[in-house]
Amino acid sequence: MEIIEYEPINLYDGRFCKVFHSDWIQLEKPKDVNLAPHFHWHNSFEFNCSISGTLLCEIGSTMAYVKDNDFLFVNPNVIHKSLENSASFLGFAVLVPVAILQLFFNPDDKNSPIIEQDVVNRHRKEIMGLLMDIYRYSRSEKPVDLLGMNACVLQIFHILLSESMATPACTILCFPHYFPAFTPPRSKLEDSISFTEYLAAHYKEHITLESVSEHFGFNPTYFSRMFAKKTGRNFNVYLSSLRLDHATHLLETTTSSIPDISEESGFSSSRAFIEMFKKVNELTPKQYRDQCNEHKKVHHSND
């Protein structure tokens, strides 16, 4: 089975995009990234461009190719890989992390941004011209050309997003309210703190591995591995322990019913709560509460 890798796209020097040149690829790819064609994904929009020659790619379950003065478009979090290119191929790839667009929007909806291919096709010629400008700016060492490159990135997405705002029925799904609030990059330690802080604040809600990984902008499988590596515990085990700790506190200190405690602690049902509690404590919640009440009576009688 072929390995599917997550490739982080790290920007620097105030850039709004990362540009990979086919003639510089060995120098530009991070050392820990596989240079051979392989399936991968990233939380970025990708434009695979051909200046001359042909490039064949597999995007999701679709085979596509690009040739002279054209480009292929890949949405964020879509698995893809380059299969082969002609001997004379000269091209480049422009990757724009979703976080760049998050700088300009501050909504509540956490859906992943998607731009339909039909929308891209309607503006293909104009976008290709801007991509070529990005290519030229990326090869320049003039500081002022960084402004030009960033301006081109913004203009591309202004073109795509303007159509969605002007035509409500348009197939573009990438409305401003689909972008979560931007969070500055954090260190690995800060990431693990952020994960646990988020769970501590939301464990009473109906959250899952999928919803939390989406909140932080990761693929669920990748996020699960990263969470375990950074916290030393499985995601579901960690979440269940938070819920059980709260439920145990309520059993000890309140007279709330078992169903109410189950709901208050974030469990999907009373049955799920009882089964989990018994598995950990070898007692049902009722048996545990009765035991606590007996201990309280003994303590009071001794006083």
Image (tube, helix red, strand yellow):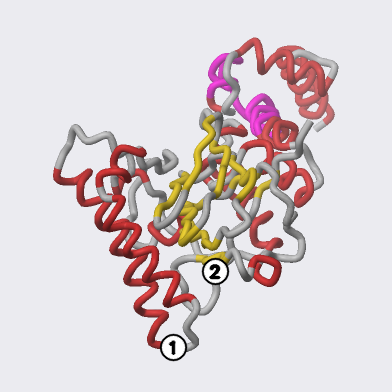
Most distant residue in the top direction: 271
Q: Residue at x 31, y 50 (%)?
A: 124
User: Residue 125's quadrant in the figure?
Assistant: bottom left
Mark 1 or mark 2: which comes first in sequence?
A: 2
Locate the C terminus by quadrant. Answer: top right
Instruction: Using residue 68 as the reference point, say whether residue 7 is left or right of it.
Output: right
Q: Residue furthest left?
A: 166
Residue at numbered disc 1: 143
Relative height, residue 74 to residue 102 (above, below): above
In the structure shown, which secondary structural element does the residue marked by tag 2 occupy? loop
Q: Quadrant of residue 8?
A: bottom right
Q: Amino acid at mark 1?
A: Pro
Q: Nearer the viewer, mark 1 or mark 2?
A: 1
Please check the rendered image and state whether residue 245 is part of the magenta-colored stretch, yes or no.
yes
- Dot 2 crowding, Cα within 10 Å, few <14, some 14–19, many 20+: some
Residue 74 vertical position relative to residue 100 in the rendered view, above or below: above
Q: Is residue 236 magenta?
A: no
Amino acid on which the number 2 mark rests in the picture: Leu
Residue 230: give its label.
none
| Picture coordinates of residue 107, whole percent (x, y) | 33, 49
User: In x, y percent, where is residue 31?
Assistant: 76, 65
| Residue at 54% from the left image edge and 19% from the top image edge | 260
Kindly state the secondary structure of the residue where label 1 is placed.
loop
> In the drawing, does residue 82 fall left or right of residue 292?
left
Span shown in magenta: 243-263
What secondary structure prevails in the magenta region? Answer: helix
Quadrant location, the N terminus: top right
Q: Label 1, label 2: how many angstroms apart (C-alpha)?
A: 16 Å
**Which residue does the numbered mark 2 point to in the structure image?**
11
Q: Is residue 255 above or below residue 128?
A: above
